[in-house]
Image (cartoon, rainbow, N blue to C red):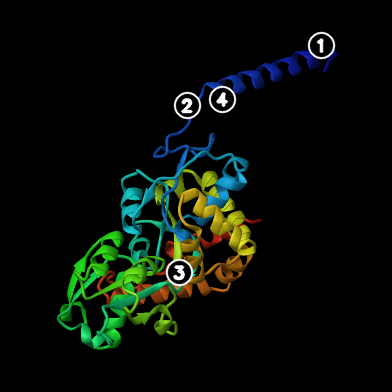
């Protein structure tokens, strides 16, 4: 090839490259609900609950600039419970969210994917008014519970341990804040609820009775909270999903090493008293990303989820115990750290 031919070839290649860049600059970013991959990162809508478990990793990500470092623009709407976030995932009003163990049947039924495990909880209790000292004493009594939450779960398990069901009580479905006020004012006899809300109740009813707690059932089932993702989002935006998982991993490591600082960051984010979150943090186990990798690869996380599914079958939430590997993105979580 002559030198002039080489020059013409180089010029043509440069022109083609400039044209491609220009076209890329004019391209419209894919919407959250569209296909086409991640030519540009979509804006991520990440739901949370305004307590330590639900908000702590988001507080870290904001403070440490992790979203920006990952090239992500994130919006973080707040919700009162997990089932509402699952519903928002299904209507394409949310991409990621946070749920407690009581809502884990929803991803098991195909309505979401578990993107990452957040913590193992020990904050749930069945509490009762003074003088009610056993689960059996709840027969015919008015018991408040937020439907589809870990409070609902602990109540169901406690009743089963006493050979009872919800048919033996007057179950009253309330949102968490209403449970607090209803119990404190004596409108209900008992409740399935969790800390730090119980701490608020104890300020007004200091001699309340604790009838059951997570540890009572530790041999039967774990109580993991988790981050969930819309199956459509994870399929259509794999790079963004990996980027989000990477941020969660970094935040997990920070929380595991700096729990006290994380409590303050969460309180600052939510403009709340850090003492309440310090209490909240006492009732959960927080693992590093590396620890979760090991628990994922040896099948422990799948065992936790399978145990929950068996409980949900007995509770009438699921027809059959779903294989956890069909909805837990364990491989993707591990890969995000490599």
Q: Residue at x 52, y 21 (%)?
A: 26
Please tell me the numbered disc located at residue 24: 4
Q: Position of residue 277 (x, y in %)?
A: 48, 62
Q: Mark 1 and mark 3: span between their CA atoms?
A: 68 Å
Q: Mark 1 and mark 4: span between their CA atoms?
A: 30 Å
Mark 1 or mark 2: name the one nearer the start of the chain.
Answer: 1
Is 110 situated left or right of 70 in this image? left
Q: Secondary structure at mark 3?
A: strand
Q: Secondary structure at mark 1?
A: helix
Q: Position of residue 214 (x, y in %)?
A: 41, 78
Q: Which residue is mark 3?
A: 224
Mark 1 or mark 3: name the one nearer the start of the chain.
Answer: 1
Q: Secondary structure at mark 2?
A: loop
Q: Position of residue 186 (x, y in %)?
A: 21, 71
Q: Is residue 328 visible?
A: no
Badge nearest the viewer, 1 or 3:
3
């Amino acid at each position: 090839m002559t030198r002039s031919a080489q020059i013409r070839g180089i010029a043509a290649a440069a022109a083609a490259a400039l044209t491609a860049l220009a076209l890329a600059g004019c391209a419209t970013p894919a919407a959250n609900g569209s296909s086409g991959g991640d030519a540009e990162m979509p804006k991520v809508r990440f739901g949370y609950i305004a307590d330590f478990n639900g908000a702590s990793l988001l507080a870290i990500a904001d403070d440490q600039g992790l979203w920006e470092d990952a090239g992500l623009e994130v919006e973080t709407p707040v919700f009162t419970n997990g089932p509402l976030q699952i519903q928002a995932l299904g209507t394409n009003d949310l991409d990621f969210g946070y749920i407690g163990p009581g809502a884990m049947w929803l991803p098991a039924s195909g309505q979401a994917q578990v993107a990452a495990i957040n913590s193992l909880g020990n904050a749930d209790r069945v509490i009762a008014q003074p003088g009610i000292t056993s689960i059996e004493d709840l027969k015919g009594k008015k018991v408040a519970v937020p439907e589809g939450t870990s409070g609902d779960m602990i109540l169901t398990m406690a009743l089963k341990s006493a050979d009872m069901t919800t048919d033996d009580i007057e179950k009253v479905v309330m949102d968490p804040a209403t449970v607090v006020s209803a119990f404190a004012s004596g409108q209900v006899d008992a409740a399935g609820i969790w800390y730090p809300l119980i701490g608020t109740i104890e300020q007004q009813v200091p001699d309340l009775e604790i009838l059951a707690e997570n540890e009572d059932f530790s041999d039967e089932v774990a109580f993991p909270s988790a981050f969930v993702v819309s199956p459509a989002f994870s399929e259509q935006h794999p790079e963004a999903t990996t980027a989000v998982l990477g941020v969660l991993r970094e935040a997990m490591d920070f929380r595991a090493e700096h729990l006290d600082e994380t409590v303050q960051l969460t309180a600052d984010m939510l403009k709340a008293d850090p003492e309440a979150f310090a209490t909240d943090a006492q009732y959960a186990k927080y693992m590093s990303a590396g620890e979760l990798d090991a628990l994922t690869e040896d099948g422990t996380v799948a065992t936790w989820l399978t145990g929950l599914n068996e409980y949900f079958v007995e509770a009438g939430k699921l027809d059959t115990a779903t294989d956890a590997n069909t909805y837990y993105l364990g491989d993707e979580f591990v890969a995000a750290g490599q």
